[in-house]
Image: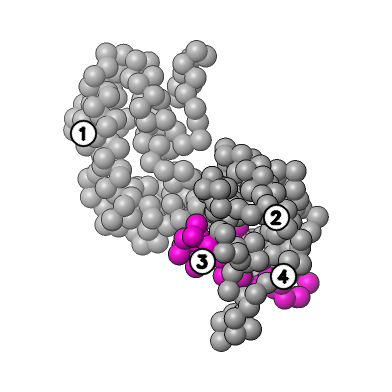
Amino acid sequence: MTKTPKVIYGSPDSPLKIGGKEIQCYVLDDETRVLTQASFLEALGRHRKANVRKKGGEERLPAILQGKAINPFISQELIEKSVPVKFKTDRGATASGYRAETLPMVCEVYLKARDANALPANQKHVAIQAEILIRALAHVGIIALVDEATGYQEVRARRALEEILDKFISTELRKWAKTFPDEFYEEMFRLRGWQYVPWSVARPSVVGKYTNDLVYERLAPGVLEELKRITPKDNKGRHKHRLFQRLTEDIGHPRLREHLSAVIALMKASNKWDQFYRGLQRALPKYGEQMRLDHGVNEPD
């Protein structure tokens, strides 16, 4: 027996306001975004209890899509997507709605029918309302609007970040292998004016800060923070393992090598540190940070 999805975000007090209409919308626990049947119909200028022709006890199509005039303009995709969605409200009641993404698709049906002079007089007002809605949706998708109205956009962003981290960071510690090429440090020392001694492991303490800035903070959102969180420290507060040992074999590690190659190329093409850093900010900016050339570059100290 199929489990009925439940509302996890949205309430009657937080409708989607668009095109002069208020549409009740929800995000279900399977991440389906739905618009209630009544408000869906009202948004397009139909009565919330419009007559629905059913077959075998089940609604074939939303009332808004039932009519000979618009039938030639309804795609198979819309037919499949417009099947009503049954769900449980936060109060436990059973409700019915339509997938949010079908709203602009239904609007397009009426606009195409109008352009073909196929709409009867009693349906032309629906095309007018469809055009209003389409214009309102021109600059932002219906899914984003529903997420904003219900407050789900924060969860969506968090889940997107979790998916990125799952791809980049492994739960198992990889065996250590030389990963950062000597060229990376040679070029860093050259641009900073430091003496580079190939066989020495002694480096200025700021090198670690530079490495985080130039590499880990630019791999993917949240990667550096998560690597630091899951990598244990010794009694002196130093990480017991290299951060790159936690990167995944199939995505994280290859992406690190690719990024290092790009950074080294930029280093080699530069004569001074500030010239290199400016190019890095332009070509490989940190996630969530925008480069502002007019106000200078925020370099690591």
State the image quarter where residue 5 is shown.
bottom right
Disc 2 vs disc 3: Cβ atoms closer than 8 Å?
no
Question: Outermost residue toward the left?
Answer: 199
- For label 3, the residue is 79
- Please tell me which of labels 4 and 3 falls first in the chain: 4
Whole-angstrom CA distance, mark 2 to mark 4, is: 15 Å
Say which mark, if any, is on residue 122: 2
- For label 1, the residue is 182
Residue 166 drawn at (x, y percent): 42, 57
- Please tell me which of labels 3 and 1 falls first in the chain: 3
- For label 4, the residue is 51
In this rendering, is residue 19 above or below 99?
above
Q: Residue at x 34, y 59 (%)?
A: 173
Horizontal placement of 152 versus 23: left or right?
left
Whole-angstrom CA distance, mark 4 to mark 1, is: 74 Å
Q: Amino acid at mark 2?
A: Asn
Whole-angstrom CA distance, mark 4 to mark 3, is: 18 Å
Q: Is residue 126 visible?
A: no
Horizontal placement of 268 versus 128: left or right?
left
Span shown in magenta: 71-100
